[in-house]
Amino acid sequence: DFSFIAEDHLSFIFGELSRQKIKITLMQNSAISLALCLEDKFGNIEKLVTALQAKFKTEHTADVSLFTVRHVQSVNTEKYYKGRNVLIEQIAASTLQMVIQ
């Protein structure tokens, strides 16, 4: 049973992020899921996770890094993936971004 991520869900999530002063560094959204890479300068991630778990099924993966390559060419991207556990990737125009662990 899949539930859709509707506008009111996104509004709730963004409201919680704002309340906890947590910055989004990468976001990937589909009809049934939302993946976020977050910057938590104030140590509020546990409060956020608790608030979101009340309404959503959540997964929290700590100790990740956002890796960004600008002006990348599609023929040269394999070298950036070697030896990395890629959790999320986005390629837009000439920029490659990966959340790695």
Image: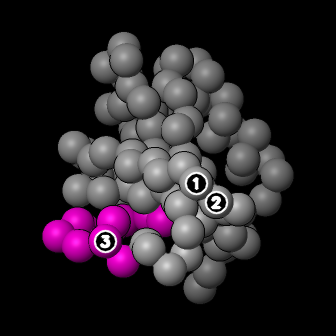
Q: How has the structure been colored for display?
A: one colour
x and y, in percent, of residue 11 in the image: 75, 40
Q: Residue furthest bottom?
A: 1
Q: Please, what is the three-letter code of the amino acid marked with disc 1?
A: His
x and y, in percent, of residue 15 in the image: 67, 29
x and y, in percent, of residue 38 in the image: 45, 37
Against 83, residue 25 (above or below) is: above
Mark 3 highlights which residue?
A: 79
Against 61, residue 4 (above or below) is: below
Against 12, residue 79 (above or below) is: below
Asked if residue 45 lies in the magenta stretch, the reply is: no
Q: Quadrant of the C terminus?
A: bottom left
Mark 1 highlights which residue?
A: 71
Q: Which residues are magenta?
A: 78-89
Q: Are marks 2 and 1 in contact (CB under 8 Å)?
A: yes
Against 65, residue 86 (above or below) is: below
Mark 2 highlights which residue?
A: 94
Residue 59 lies in quadrant: bottom left
Q: Residue at x 80, y 48 (%)?
A: 8
Q: Please, what is the three-letter code of the amino acid marked with disc 3?
A: Lys
